[in-house]
Image (cartoon, helix red, strand yellow):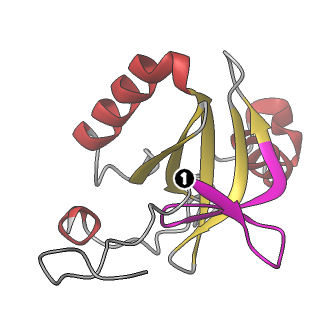
Amino acid sequence: APPSEAGEAPSPPPAPEYYHDKEGYLCVGKLRVSTQRLGYGSLGTIVYRGELEGRPVAIKRMLRDYHRAADREISLLLESDGHPHVVRYFVQEKAGEFVFLALQLCAMTLHEAVQAVTKSQGGGGGGTAKRKRLPPPLQERQGRGREEREA
């Protein structure tokens, strides 16, 4: 394209909101969303396995119509940042009719953790088993600090 009258090259066309890469991941901003579903939530929410700049994360896909719920969830996660029993929030991306939240990927579901503790206690019968903590680590803490995420 010819340069503009001011002698500057024209700006490139805007990047698409999302695209699929050659491995089949949906790419939205810094996120790569796989087709592997980890769970379902209310109001059409689906959680997928994905990546944030190469790091494994859980990606919660919410309908954009419910952005207030997403904003509220982000606010609560930021208030609880660093708490050992709350997943970490990394980033939000928007594309089409969806909002994508990148969250800390847990090593197991809550159901799996409860089953593991119950099994380790021998079913908990008779009240003789000692109370045990959840198997470490319930959550994979590979995260960076909030400062690095907001940079």
Residue drawn at the location 39% of the way across and 18% of the way down:
68
Residue drawn at the location 50% of the way across and 77% of the way down:
53
- In the picture, measured across the screen, residue 144 lies left or right of residue 86, that is left
Foreground of the two, 10 or 109: 10
Q: Give the range drawn in magenta.
A: 18-38
Check if residue 34 falls in the magenta segment. Answer: yes
Check if residue 31 falls in the magenta segment. Answer: yes
Foreground of the two, 150 or 93: 93
Foreground of the two, 47 or 6: 6
The amino acid sitting under disc 1 is: Glu
Is residue 107 at least partly visible in the picture? no
- In the picture, measured across the screen, residue 7 lies left or right of residue 83, that is left
Instruction: Farthest residue to the left: give it.
Output: 6
* Residue 27, above or below 93: below
* Residue 64, above or below 47: above
Decide whether the magenta segment is chiefly helix, strand or loop.
strand
SS label for mark 1: loop
Q: Name the residue under label 1.
A: 17
Quadrant of the rendering where the N terminus is positioned: bottom left
Res 45 quadrant in image: top right
